[in-house]
Image (spheres, grey):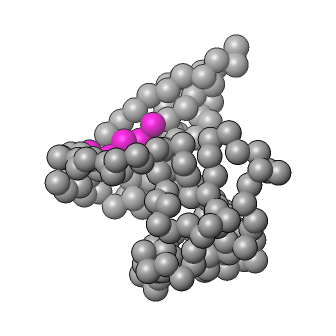
């Protein structure tokens, strides 16, 4: 099993008409195209489409996708509803978070917090914050450190959540 890229990346554009309805169109670029090159081409396309339509562009998304060519078998009992919520500190002093579905009980402390001393968690944190990592918050600020992590379920409410750290 290995991750294989699709032959193309997708540029998906959103257009709004006078009635407020939103339409979409997708154009593909070769997978090897650098993101900066694809974005420059997309910006030029937005201007060209504006000239031939009466709609306004609301923005676009550039997506490079990979998929497993032979996915393995999930661990018995794993559930995507059982999430690991990871809250990170960023270079601009703010925070960002993402939830990982199917968190392993082996990386949790008895109270539901993520165990920051667990070897697999240490490797995970290094992959997100390491020197060569490019991960950032939605505002573009680099992720610098794990603030805290905890187990959450799809229906977990704030007052039901494990402690923050």
Magenta run includes residue 105? no
Q: Is residue 46 above or below residue 66?
A: above
Q: Is residue 10 magenta?
A: yes
**Residue lying farthest to the front in this orientation:** 110
Which secondary structure class fits the magenta region best? strand
Q: Residue at x 49, y 35 (%)?
A: 13
Q: Vertically, is 48 above or below 105? A: above
Question: On the picture, is 21 further left or further right than 23?
Answer: right
Q: Residue furthest top?
A: 19
Q: Position of residue 112 (x, y in %)?
A: 64, 62
Q: Where's residue 115, x and y in %? A: 57, 74
- Residue 5, x across and y down, in percent: 24, 51
| Residues in magenta, as a range | 8-12
Residue sitting at x 60%, y 70%: 109
Q: Answer yes or no: is residue 55 visible.
A: no
Where residue 59 sits: x, y (%)?
58, 40
Image side of residue 10 versus residue 81, left or right: left
For this rendering, which residue is in front, 159 or 88? Answer: 159
């Amino acid at each position: 099993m290995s991750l294989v890229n699709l032959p193309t990346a997708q540029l998906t554009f959103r257009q709004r008409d006078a009635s407020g309805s939103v339409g979409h169109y997708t154009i593909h670029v070769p997978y090897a195209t650098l993101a900066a090159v694809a974005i420059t081409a997309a910006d030029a396309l937005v201007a060209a489409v504006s000239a031939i339509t009466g709609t306004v562009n609301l923005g676009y998304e550039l997506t490079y996708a990979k998929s497993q060519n032979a996915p393995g078998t999930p661990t018995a009992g794993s559930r995507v509803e059982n999430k690991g919520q990871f809250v990170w500190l960023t270079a601009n002093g703010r925070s960002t978070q993402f939830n990982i579905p199917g968190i392993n009980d082996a990386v949790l402390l008895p109270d539901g917090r993520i165990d920051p001393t667990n070897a697999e968690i240490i490797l995970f944190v290094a992959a997100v914050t390491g020197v060569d990592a490019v991960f950032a918050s939605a505002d573009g600020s680099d992720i610098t450190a794990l603030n805290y992590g905890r187990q959450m379920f799809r229906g977990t409410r704030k007052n039901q959540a494990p402690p923050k750290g």
